[in-house]
Image (cartoon, grey):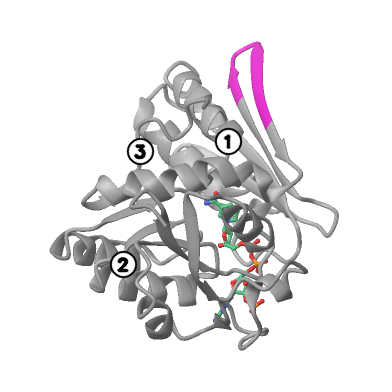
Amino acid sequence: MTADVVRVAFGGATGYVGRTLVPSILARSDFKLVGALGRKRAGVDIGTALGLEPAGVQITDDIQAVLAREPQVLIDYSAPEPAARWCRAAVEAGVAVVMATTALPPSAVVEIGRAAERNDVGVFLAGNLSTAAHLMMRCAELLGRYMGDVEIVEGHPSTKLDSPSGTSFETAELINRAGNPPRTADLTQFGLPESRGAQLGRVRVHSMRMPGMVDHQEVFFSSPGGLITIRTESFSPIVFAGPTLKAAKLILGEHGLVRELPGIYEPD
Ligand SMILES: NC(=O)c1ccc[n+]([C@@H]2O[C@H](COP(=O)([O-])OP(=O)(O)OC[C@H]3O[C@@H](n4cnc5c(N)ncnc54)[C@H](OP(=O)(O)O)[C@@H]3O)[C@@H](O)[C@H]2O)c1
């Protein structure tokens, strides 16, 4: 193994995203999988669990056992509770983190960021690591400077644990930061107030959770007499693979909590 091989642990290795990203890691000569965190298949080799050749790495929910195998970076796509624990333990052990799990409590994110600073490692937090979603958010940020009325409609499978999605939170955050053409006054008085969605700053978010949905977001911008819609849809978690693995390398040179990694979405 050369010094350029990155030792990586994966949180949520058997999940919807993990089942696609772990095989991508195993197929790469510049990464070595040294840890696979999961729960139901604990004790089973991760390669075997994914229908591949044995990888020599047993699934475990014991973060300390994973850290003992000296990963340089933890990529986490799990659930808020284990993610907060695992990411905190990783940075305390001097391991960098790509923190992709959404809906961590803001206080946990702040604590993990502080622990990363103390331990001089980087933590990358991103609500959506697909290039298409990144471009959608950049466009939304631009349009938000000119158009005050913004509503998001997002859809995911019924199995998704959080609502609104991390993508819509991050999109709203960027739009709210971008500027302030005011919203048109909303004169709704009658009916069901919840039908107007959740309000994140000046952005309304409407979340659909349906079995047939995969990963869908539309952002509607309006000014009097006009409408612009940006729509993104992904059909496979493979969209997260390239940027996630780039992030796993780029975060090794960072310190503390970072929200952007220059070059991560550039074409190879
Ligand atoms: N930032 C991004 O670009 C991005 C993209 C897609 C998804 N996400 C986020 O990534 C997370 C995972 O998404 P997913 O669709 O892959 O979810 P998922 O299919 O539910 O998979 C969750 C994974 O985490 C493991 N896990 C959950 N709770 C655990 C616990 N208490 N102890 C040990 N393992 C546990 C599960 O293992 P078991 O099956 O053994 O319980 C499974 O491997 C979500 O927060 C999602 O919103 C982020």
Q: Amino acid at mark 1?
A: Ala
Residue 92 visible somewhere in the drawing: yes
Distance from Cα at disc 1 to Cα at disc 3:
15 Å
Is mark 1 in CB contact (under 8 Å) with mark 3?
no
* Dot 1 alpha-carbon crowd within 10 angstroms: few under 14, some 14 to 19, many 20 or more: many
Q: Position of residue 239 (x, y in %)?
A: 64, 42
Which element carries disc 2, helix, strand or loop? helix
In-image side of 47 versus 246 (left or right): right
Distance from Cα at disc 2 to Cα at disc 3:
22 Å
Q: Which residue is mark 1?
A: 133
Foreground mark, 2 or 3, reads 3
Q: Earlier in the sequence, mark 1 or mark 3?
A: 1
Is residue 237 located in the magenta-colored stretch of the structure? no
Q: Position of residue 233 (x, y in %)?
A: 72, 37
Q: Position of residue 191 (x, y in %)?
A: 72, 50
Q: Earlier in the sequence, mark 1 or mark 2?
A: 2
Q: Which residue is mark 3?
A: 261
Q: Amino acid at mark 3?
A: Leu
Q: Which residue is mark 2?
A: 107
**Bounds of the magenta segment:** 221-231
Q: Residue placed farthest to the right in the image? A: 212
Distance from Cα at disc 1 to Cα at disc 2:
25 Å
